[in-house]
Image (cartoon, coloured by chain):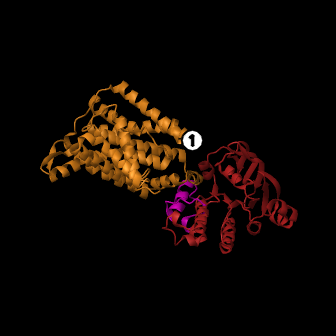
Chain colours: A orange, B red
């Protein structure tokens, strides 16, 4: 009984780390640029499809696919910011919503057109194949790898934002873009770079998922909804909140799946609603 | 001539804020924009900086046309900006605020370094590891001045430097501005405080309703009761 509780917790943690990678990019972009990118889930999906193609169609190594896919996603994000999103920074959020929502539809059709509507997947890379017993049951090594990688990405992000000059510039421009420009920071270029970086994080999440999650045109919507739940629970624009929010949602989904499958999807929304009622600014947000 | 603005017209949306403003500042001068609240002093400085670009007219910095340049390029051309509401980077420490400006100016070989700015503004030295948001108003003002100096400007735009400061701090500010001037930085400032301006500036432009109404030396303006009553008295 207790074993199953722990085992399911580990499953939840590995789910959480995919969610974290998606939510991290979403949160970073919102925190710095002030844009809620509804198409962020589509960038995650694009990362999955591009890496899948690299591995399955071009026959490249999994790790090469993991490197190339997200870079192409970053490029797509950069073009999206440079030619479209940049134009709506200063106008009403409703336009940002409409524009990024349009991108969801465009990416969804693009993916169906190029890769077809069927579910795809790729094999687990050799070095991370197999399973090791955890709490008396075999647990996939690949999931352990993902669980370890998530906090490392978090640590890397923290270091980048707090300790590097690029991070300090980002924090300065996030707080006051006019004054950042007035000391010589090319803010539009910085924002494009941040958008590309956030897109890259989403792409990494998608690419990492191809051996154990299905690659399908519906994955963008699934993930963007969960990533928004994470952002709301953790506090919009707050990376620490996104990390712990992801863990919370991952665990709720994993336990819900086993103990109350009928309500599996409802738990996430109940949790979100409860937190909104008690702490509208989210767990780590400041009001 | 370090700065020349030729009949600039600036708008906020539909409202016409600056009307054919022309002014010139010579190298080494301290020039003040005088006038009551809302006459266009801040907008003039923001127009020069490229933060609210004029819709017509031209701005020359050292005979180079900088009208229409984005603010980061104006900054890199040698214009430092101290806004009236200070606007230090709240999340960065005092030292990071200063270093960041130094890095992006592209003018690191100038005279102003971290050590020199801290010598000029010694109050900041002990505050160095503190974040911008935890500073008092006066400390933020000093940091804002130091941050602009770290870009090694040829021209410093100072918006309402004396506003909200205690008389004692204003006294210190007079000394600071004089020292900056001795370092061959030209200053264009906006202030409402005629007594303070007289202590630091040579010449002034008086603005009213977004247009230059009068230009002259500070001593001349100070002595002209009619002008003081019409444009400056509150």
- Quick check: B107 above or below A255? below
Write down the quadrant of residue A212 in the picture.
top left
Q: Quadrant of the N terminus of chain B?
A: bottom right
Residue A60 part of the magenta segment? no
Write down the quadrant of residue A113 in the picture.
top left
Residue B89 part of the magenta segment? yes
* Disc 1 secondary structure class: loop
| Picture coordinates of residue A187, whole percent (x, y) | 54, 47
| Picture coordinates of residue B129, whole percent (x, y) | 48, 67
* Rendered residue at 25%/34% (across/down): A122
Instruction: Identify residue for label 1.
Output: A91
Crowd band around label 1 with a 10 angstrom C-alpha radius: few (<14), some (14–19), many (20+):
few
Say whether residue B224 is visible.
no
A13 displayed left or right of B23: left
* Rendered residue at 30%/33% (across/down): A215
| Picture coordinates of residue B198, whole percent (x, y) | 77, 67
Q: Quadrant of the C terminus of chain B?
A: bottom right
Tell me where the magenta segment starts and ends, as one range: B86-115
Instruction: Pick the residue in front: B10 or B48.
Output: B10
């Amino acid at each position: 009984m207790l074993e199953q509780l722990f085992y399911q917790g580990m499953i939840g943690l590995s789910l959480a780390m995919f969610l974290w990678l998606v939510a991290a990019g979403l949160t970073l972009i919102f925190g710095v640029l002030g844009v809620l990118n509804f198409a962020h889930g589509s960038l995650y999906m694009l990362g999955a499809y591009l890496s899948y193609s690299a591995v399955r169609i071009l026959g490249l190594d999994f790790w090469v696919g993991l490197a190339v896919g997200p870079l192409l996603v970053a490029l797509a994000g950069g073009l999206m910011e440079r030619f479209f999103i940049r134009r709506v920074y200063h106008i009403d959020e409703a336009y940002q919503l409409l524009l990024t929502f349009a991108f969801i539809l465009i990416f969804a059709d693009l993916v169906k057109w190029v890769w077809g509507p069927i579910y795809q997947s790729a094999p687990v890379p050799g070095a991370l194949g197999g399973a090791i017993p955890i709490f008396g049951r075999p647990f996939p090594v690949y999931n352990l790898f993902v669980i370890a990688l998530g906090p490392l990405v978090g640590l890397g992000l923290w270091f980048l934002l707090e300790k590097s000059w690029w991070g300090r510039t980002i924090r300065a421009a996030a707080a006051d873009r006019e004054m950042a420009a007035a000391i010589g920071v090319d803010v539009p270029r910085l924002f494009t770079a941040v958008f590309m970086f956030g897109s890259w994080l989403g792409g990494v999440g998608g690419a990492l998922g191809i051996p154990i999650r299905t690659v399908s045109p519906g994955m963008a919507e699934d993930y963007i909804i969960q990533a928004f739940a994470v952002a709301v629970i953790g506090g919009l624009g707050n990376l620490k909140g996104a990390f712990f929010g992801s863990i919370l949602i991952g665990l709720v989904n994993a336990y819900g799946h086993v103990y109350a499958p009928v309500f599996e999807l409802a738990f996430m929304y109940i949790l979100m609603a409860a937190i909104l009622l008690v702490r509208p600014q989210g767990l780590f947000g400041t009001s | 001539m370090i700065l020349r603005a030729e009949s600039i017209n600036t708008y906020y949306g539909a409202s016409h804020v600056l009307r054919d403003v022309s002014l010139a500042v010579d190298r080494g001068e301290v020039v003040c924009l005088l006038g009551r609240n809302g006459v266009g002093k801040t907008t003039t400085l923001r127009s020069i900086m490229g933060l609210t670009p004029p819709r017509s007219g031209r701005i020359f910095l050292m005979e180079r046309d900088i009208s229409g340049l984005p603010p980061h390029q104006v900054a890199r051309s040698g214009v430092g900006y101290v806004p009236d509401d200070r606007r230090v980077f709240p999340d960065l420490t005092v030292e990071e605020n200063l270093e960041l400006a130094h890095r992006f100016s592209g003018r690191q070989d100038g005279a102003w370094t971290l050590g020199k700015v801290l010598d000029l503004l010694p109050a900041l030295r002990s505050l160095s590891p503190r974040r911008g948001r935890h500073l008092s108003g006066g400390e933020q003002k000093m940091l804002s001045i130091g941050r602009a100096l770290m870009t090694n400007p040829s021209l410093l735009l100072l918006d309402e430097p004396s506003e909200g400061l205690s008389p004692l701090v204003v006294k210190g500010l007079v000394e600071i501005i004089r020292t900056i001037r001795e370092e061959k930085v030209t200053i264009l400032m906006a202030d409402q405080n005629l007594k303070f301006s007289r202590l630091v500036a040579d010449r002034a432009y008086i603005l009213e309703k977004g247009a230059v109404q009068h230009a002259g030396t500070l001593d001349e303006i100070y002595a002209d009761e009619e002008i003081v009553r019409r444009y400056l008295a509150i």
